[in-house]
Amino acid sequence: MTSAHPPHAHVSLPALAHARGIDRIVAGVSTSDGDGVKLTRVLQQTLQQRLDPFLMLDAFGSDNPGDYIGGFPNHPHRGFETVTYMIAGRMRHRDSAGHEGLLQNGGVQWMTAGRGLIHSELPEQEEGRMEGFQLWLNLPARDKMREPGYRDIQSAEIPEYTSAGGVHVRVIAGRSNGVAGAVQREHTEPLYLDLMLPPGTEFTQALPPQHNALVYVFRESVFIGSSEVPTKRMAILANAPESDGVQLRAPRTNHSPARVLLIAGRPLHEPIAQYGPFVMNTRDQVAQAVHDFQNGKMG
């Protein structure tokens, strides 16, 4: 986890007066997508209003090439952004707007589908481990038909810091304890952190009380308040008007550092109409997206 940014060492963490608790813990559902890629759908469609502006979170990870080798051949998107974070592996992105990039260990692909494009994400490996996440971030109604965009963010471009207590933080989006992330967004204000908590350490992050937030644990376990969140589980954080942030604690009994995604954002409070890879505000807009795709008008 190296960075071209000089890592900020011994950053002080805020003291919280009213840390958030847990609303519920979600296990996710095993499924497959693309050309048979096996994954866990952690944030499902039924949770979109609760976790607005986030629409989906998939976790994938396997040492078996048969679970990922087919990748994600050409498919369309309209109306939102996809954020793919690769923990291990190599995947090639190509899209109809002419963008191309290689997503590899520790890197992020941030794609704004906007009015629509067609893209593919195909593995550039035939063996070894493929592990990562894809997050779908909604666009406000005013931006759903904007020009598509793409940014390939290599691992070295992601700012990192270490807290005074020894927690290592990668700031993919938003701001964390004075460190600005690789990506900023005006309307949804997403925060996307990858945290590594050695056994016995704590981490605090200030959060606006109106923002929706989740914690996904993918190594070991962490405590949020008195509740333990085991590995491969998502904790949806409770919303309370007096809350000022979240506190995570890695049990001393963990055998290795806990790895956690902390994701939060400002809800849009707009209607969500989804049909597969199209996310708009009305059914008519979705029908138009399908029509445009079928008639070659999407990228």
Image (cartoon, rainbow, N blue to C red):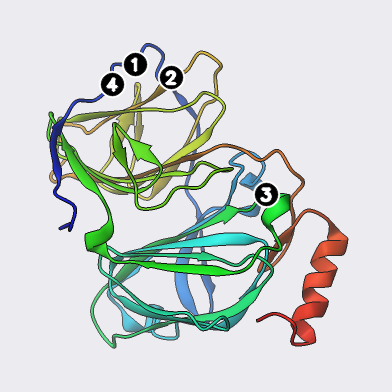
Q: Secondary structure at mark 1?
A: loop
Q: What amino acid is found at the position of numbered circle 1 in the picture?
A: Leu
Which labelled disc corresponds to residue 14?
4
Residue position marked by numbered label 1 in the rendering: 16
Please tell me which residue is depicted at 74% across the width and 87% down the height of the picture.
296
Q: Is 73 left, or right, of 152 in this rendering?
A: right
Q: In this view of the protein, which residue sits in the foreground, 109 or 71?
A: 109
Find the distance from the CA under tag 1 to the CA under tag 2: 6 Å
Of residue 20 and residue 219, the one placed in the foreground of this image is 20
Question: Number of marks in the image?
Answer: 4
Sequence-first tag of 1 and 2: 1
The spot of residue 238 in percent (x, y) is 52, 26
Question: What residue is shown with label 3?
Answer: 140
The residues tagged by marks 2 and 4 sit, at their Cα atoms, a distance apart of 10 Å
Q: Is residue 261 left or right of residue 139?
A: left
Q: Residues within 10 Å of mark 2 (few under 14, many from 20)?
A: many
Q: CA distance from mark 2 to mark 3?
A: 25 Å
- Which callout, 2 or 3, points to the residue nearer the camera? 3
Kindly identify the residue that appears in the image at 66 percent across and 72 percent down. Answer: 116
Q: Which mark is residue 221?
A: none
Residue occupied by mark 2: 244
Judged from the image, the secondary structure of the residue bearing numbered disc 4 is loop
**Residue type marked 4:** Pro
Tell me whether circle 4 and circle 1 mark residues in contact (CB < 8 Å).
Answer: yes
Vertical comparison of 113 with 247: above or below: below
Q: Earlier in the sequence, mark 3 or mark 1?
A: 1
